[in-house]
Image (cartoon, rainbow, N blue to C red):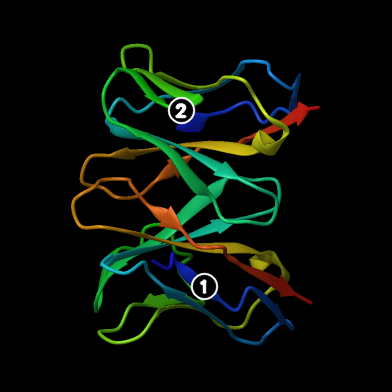
């Protein structure tokens, strides 16, 4: 049973470019979460999605960041016009329906903005 | 003040020692408590999941929750070098789904 899958594992972008991060949840999981981990900091919640719905985006920066979880295919975290401060590890997690907080994390995408 | 406080360490102990890791929190609405282990440049791995005050044991790991003191702990018995990692506490309000993490404690077990 494959775990949460994320790709790419490493992504390098120049300032002003777009970054697209993909996440496939564990089989049978319908809830997807994105978290960001800045160097020497803990994980910070960004957004919680179910299929075709954004449930909680209270942790998302107001500009340049967006997320989706379409009916078919992986969840996408999109960062437009990246800046150096966006350099971080971005983790996706998924959970089954009825277990508050029991989230399983993927290996992360490490974004470097030059 | 952060919602969840965790001493970042680093913490270094000899192999075989009992390790105690702790977090305190300020929001009494937190109902579910987790401990994650994160190896360098890897994703967090769920170790323990608890929702009531008291102890929960799984192998060499024991999670302890004291809601009256807003204090949670993770104990590791017979520690091994392979336990060297960063340990993150996390908690969530019932129904909210948004995990709030501590900063993480970097642990090294010396052979």
Task: Return the residue found at the far top.
Answer: B69
Q: Chain of mark 2?
A: B
User: Quick check: do tags 2 and 1 share a chain?
Assistant: no
| Whether residue A67 can be seen here | yes
Q: Is residue A62 left or right of residue B13?
A: left
- The disc at residue A6 is 1
Q: Residue A108: x percent and y percent?
A: 57, 64
Q: Secondary structure at mark 1?
A: strand
Quick check: B18 above or below B82?
Answer: above
Where residue B76 sits in the image (x, y, percent)?
A: 56, 23
Height in image: B28 above or below A4?
A: above
Q: Which residue is more in the foreground, A96 or A32?
A: A96
3D distance between C-alphas at marks 2 and 1? 30 Å
Q: Is residue B91 above or below residue A61?
A: above
Secondary element type, mark 2: loop
Find residue A74 and report its image quarter.
Answer: bottom left
Q: Which residue is disc 2 drawn over?
A: B59
Q: Residue at x 62, y 15 (%)?
A: B18
Chain hosting mark 1: A
Image position of B9 (left or right of A29): right
| A21 vs B58: above or below | below
- Residue A3 or A90: which is nearer the viewer? A3
């Amino acid at each position: 049973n494959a775990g949460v899958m994320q790709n790419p594992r490493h992504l390098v972008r120049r300032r002003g470019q777009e970054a697209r991060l993909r996440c496939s949840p564990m089989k049978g999981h319908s809830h997807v979460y994105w978290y960001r981990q800045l160097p020497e900091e803990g994980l910070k919640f960004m957004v919680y999605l179910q299929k075709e719905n954004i449930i909680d985006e209270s942790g998302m920066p107001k500009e340049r960041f967006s997320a989706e979880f379409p009916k078919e295919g992986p969840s996408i975290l999109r960062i437009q016009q990246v800046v150096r401060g966006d350099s971080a590890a971005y983790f996706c997690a998924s959970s089954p329906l009825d277990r508050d907080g029991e989230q399983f994390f993927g290996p992360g995408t490490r974004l470097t903005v030059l | 003040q952060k919602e969840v406080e965790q001493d970042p360490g680093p913490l270094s102990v000899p192999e075989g020692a009992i390790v105690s890791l702790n977090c305190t929190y300020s929001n009494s609405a937190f109902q579910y408590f987790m401990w994650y282990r994160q190896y360098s440049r890897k994703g967090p791995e769920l170790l323990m999941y608890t929702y009531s005050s008291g102890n929960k044991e799984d192998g060499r790991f024991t999670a302890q929750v004291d809601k009256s003191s807003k204090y949670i702990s993770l104990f590791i018995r017979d520690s091994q070098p392979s336990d060297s990692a960063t340990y993150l506490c996390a908690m969530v309000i019932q129904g909210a789904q948004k995990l709030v993490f501590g900063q993480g404690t970097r642990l090294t077990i010396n052979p």
